[in-house]
Image (cartoon, rainbow, N blue to C red):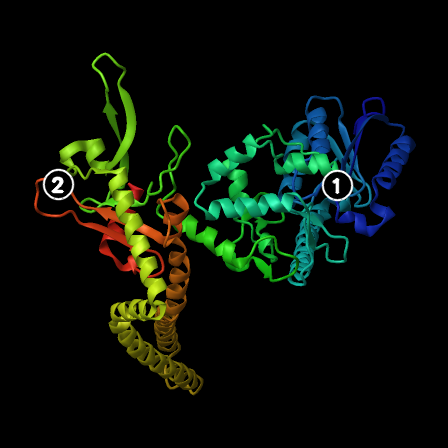
Amino acid sequence: MKSKQEIKVGIYARLSKDDERNGESLSIENQKLILEKYVLEQGWNLIDEYIDDGYSGTTFDRPGVQRLLEDAKCGRINTIIVKDLSRFGRNYIQVGQYTDYIFPMYNIRFIALNDNVDTSNNSAGMDMMPIMNIFNEWHSANTSKKIRAVIEANAKAGKYRTTYAPYGYVKGTDEKKLPVVDEPAASNVKRIFEMRASGISPKHIAMKFNDENIPIPSDYRTQKFGITAYRFSHHLWTCDVVKQILRNPTYLGHLVQLRTTNISYKNKKQIKRPDEEKIIVYNTHEPIISQELWDKVKEIERSVSQGKAQGNQIVHPLSGLMYCEDCGNKMHIGWNNTRHSRKGPRIYRQANYNCGGFKVFGTRVCTSHMIKFEDIESIVLQDIKAKAKLVLENEEQVRNDYLKRQEKDFNTQRINDTKQLKSNSQRILEIERLIRSTYEDKVLKKIPEDICISLLNNYQNEKEQLQKENTQINERIEKLKQQTKNVDEFIKRVKKYVEAPILTREMTMELIEFVTIDKYRPKNDPIPREIHIYYKLIDDVENLDFKRNCQKQDRL
């Protein structure tokens, strides 16, 4: 044992947020009072106090305990005193490493008063220390489960759990703290959705807001509510900020909570939860946007086109929507140059689209598929206006024609799906009967246990496979039922453009899925070029081999 003159004490106190519920007995002041009194009674030299207020004992990544350990290793203190083992930590592996290996290596004495633990002697408390450490960790794990259960129950009850509401809302003052619409931020949120629905990219939305000097969400909170953001910021709108707003279903009036979780009660790293584990409570507060606008934005996000802006910040109407018919690569914008006089400067202007594979690799990949801006835009515009004119002249006939065309495409699939669904359902019922029979035979000892287990596993695997097939079939059948709604929506969209003077980006993003262009032909070639326009909602583009080839090329 060290002499009184040699003992240099550091006392350590910790209080987590969960411990605060236990009242004054675990408070920092109460711990310090007990420890200081003990040091005084022993006549030892108190060097320093180390405090961690609001930190969990499951991790040693705490500023107070880290400073304590550094001082102990460098010799500033040689005795550590805590009120009990749980104050030092609730991770029994790490606590054991310090008390059994690290502290003896540095000749550090460790005392836990209430647990009668003193590493300088072999007391009964030392024998019980491993058990107490395990119990302390169990207590932490059990507390974590209880807290998670309460948080989940509150989320299901529609109680809003957040530090502050998303941009466009403020936390309410009612019992559930539900979001309340906040102007003018709410108008900016709605504008972001409307701009994206019109085909404007998140990047250009951010640039527009920066040009208009609209404060970013963190600056807005600081200006209006005095909530300071501690993270470094350029105070400019970015593409990521816009995307976060566009992905947030809170603006529909729904609460989506428990989106993230910790890996465990020991590891506080946050990970995203799967969608099926998130808790959604619908229609809890006033929405900022409509479901129709949300769906339109999602449709734009699924589009093959991302809309590449040129140097003048203009996104051409068909940018990203055109593909080479032969190789499946996207069509790229090409440059033409003109010179009005031999001495005058050469002027470059964008005037055509061409196959991306040909532009990059030449004839080793593809051939020229060049087409002028004005030609392809005129063709697409005229086709849209022709469809709009037909709708205005006889909407019911056009509607029936579209439905008949889609029925023809899906009729064979519908018949096959119905037969397969019926067959699968009958087999599932038969398997359930066989499972019951197998259990009965096992109970009556008619078959050995190993054969019973093998049969049950085979039956269950087959049943799960059939149920999975039925789910896919039902999804296809539901898709067929959606056809009428899709046709009505297309008619509603297209008839707005019967008098459209020019082709616009908003028009193409609303109507066009993609366009394919065949190879370039000289003017004197008698064979006409093939240009296919595939429309949203009425063309079954998912089942096209060409579409699958395009998606493969996009990933390359």
Answer yes or no: is residue 267 visible: no
60 horizontally vs 478: left or right? right
Answer yes or no: is residue 241 visible: yes
Q: Which residue is mark 2?
A: 521
Residue type, label 1: Gly
Asked which secondary structure carries label 2, the reply is loop
Residue at the spot 51% in from the left edge and 54% down from the top edge: 294
Residue type, label 2: Arg
Q: Is residue 148 above or below residue 326?
A: below
Q: Which residue is mark 1?
A: 54
131 horizontally vs 318: left or right? right
Asked which secondary structure carries label 1, the reply is loop
Question: Which label number is shown at residue 449?
Answer: none
Residue at the spot 35% in from the left edge and 38% down from the top edge: 316
Count neighbours of disc 2 (C-alpha within 10 A) and say few if under 14, some if 14 to 19, many if 20 or more. some
Q: Is residue 232 above or below residue 555?
A: above
Residue at the spot 14% in from the left edge and 35% down from the top edge: 364
The label nearer to you, 1 versus 2, is 2
